[in-house]
Amino acid sequence: MRTILVTGGAGFIGSNYILYVLEQRDDVRVINLDKLTYAGNLDNLSAVANDPRYEFVAGDIGNRELVDHLMPKVNAVVNFAAESHVDRSIMGAEQFMHANATGVYVLLEAARRHGVERFLQVSTDEVYGSLAPDEAPWTEASPLAPRNPYAVSKAAGDMMARSFYITHGLPVLVTRAANNLGPYQYPEKRVPLFITNAIDDRPLPVYGQGTAVRDHLFVTDHCEAIDLVLRCGEPGEVYNVGADNDAGGMELTERILDALGKPRSLIQHVTDRPGHDMRYALDIAKLRRLGWAPRHDLDACIAKTVAWYCDHEAWWRKIKDSWGYRAYYERQYGGR
Ligand code: NAD
Ligand code: TYD
């Protein structure tokens, strides 16, 4: 039996990964270390809460004593824990630096001291910056040029992880993924926000003219990629995880409305995000060579995600009805 310390496992991708790995691998135990910020939600993990191979620990990855206590029990670390929303990082980035930079350092240091066999740092395409329409997709060799506080904090984590491989020989792997879609995504991110607003016939706030382009990766495809890189990736290497599902903001919004049978009149153009990255695109040849390919095209990503939010109203209404969410929404969109 191998034990994986999954950090941030109560968030969107982390909870999908825990459900995936416990389902797929009989020989794996999971310890989920999560601080339960506004984005952490144990409802996501109710299906495994009583599984003897699953243990939840409430705590901060920046807590050195706690991390030191857990590390001797684990063979591998998969670090999802992060502050993850660009718009919140624009409001203030202190927690981003704490979780995404210092927190990664604390985990790496403990992993090194206790001789952990594999350390996978879950990162993002945003560390590469922003592409012009005619530029080729980023490879893993592309320079890092992050442009917003969230992306900078993630790049700091990536670079610290790299340094622990080079300096200390810790077997570190880094994945850099595109925008994820799927079950359990907190409805501050564009896709679940737009789906749930549309269900309630509320406006969909499109930043600027809706021309920014994103690649869209279904979350279970991301989980499969992480599982593969953790087992078969080369230590010290970075792996891009994209799906070639590019879409501009207007196209994506219209597809969501069409999937729900809702009118285009719900689209409301609002003031653009400062420093808005206009295009992300990844070259995924390296991960394909390892044996991975995305299973979901853009239609499948949208159809499955829309269906999940339609079928799980109680999950997202509990969040959207909360005081914290309402306060955030007013601050972010009120008078925009
Ligand atoms: P999320 O915001 O849904 O979840 C983050 C989780 O981390 C939450 O459960 C939160 O409670 C926990 N957390 C935050 N700070 C913590 C701390 N200091 N100690 C312990 N736990 C802490 O995020 P997500 O969308 O699931 O993203 C997971 C990871 O994947 C992040 O590292 C993110 O940068 C990366 N990523 C996300 C996307 C995406 O589209 N969502 C794309 C590429 C990469
Ligand atoms: P988001 O889901 O925040 O992910 P990221 O900025 O990390 O890619 O945003 C995705 C895209 O959607 C991005 O181009 C900004 C845009 N967007 C809106 O137009 N309106 C919104 O309310 C949000 C949250 C995002």
Image: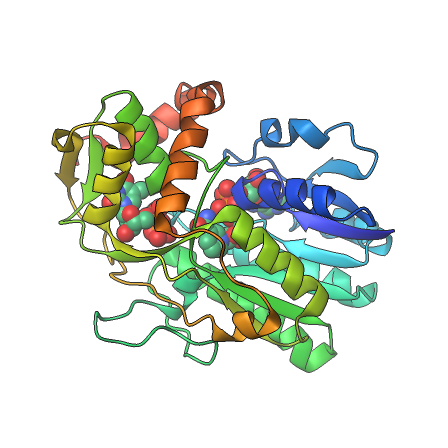
Residue 222 relative to residue 24: left or right: left
Q: Is residue 87 visible?
A: no
- Percent x, y for residue 142? 41, 79
Front residue of this view, candidates 129 and 204: 204
Residue closer to the observer: 268 or 7: 268
Residue 281, position in %: x, y?
35, 66
The residue under the point 20% across, 42% down is 206
As displayed, is residue 209 above or below residue 293? above
Residue at the spot 66% in from the left edge and 71% down from the top edge: 233
Front in this rendered view, residue 27 or 76: 27
Tell me the quarter of the picture where residue 72 sits. Answer: bottom right
* Image coordinates for residue 42, horizontal then vertical, percent: 62, 30
Can residue 24 be spotted in the picture?
A: yes
Specify the quadrant of the image occupied by residue 195.
top left
Left or right of 184 in this view: 8: right
Q: Is residue 47 above or below residue 107?
A: above
Instruction: Decide if residue 194 is on the left or right side of residue 314.
Output: left
Classify the position of the C terminus by image quarter.
top left
Coordinates of residue 283 in the picture (x, y in percent): 42, 72
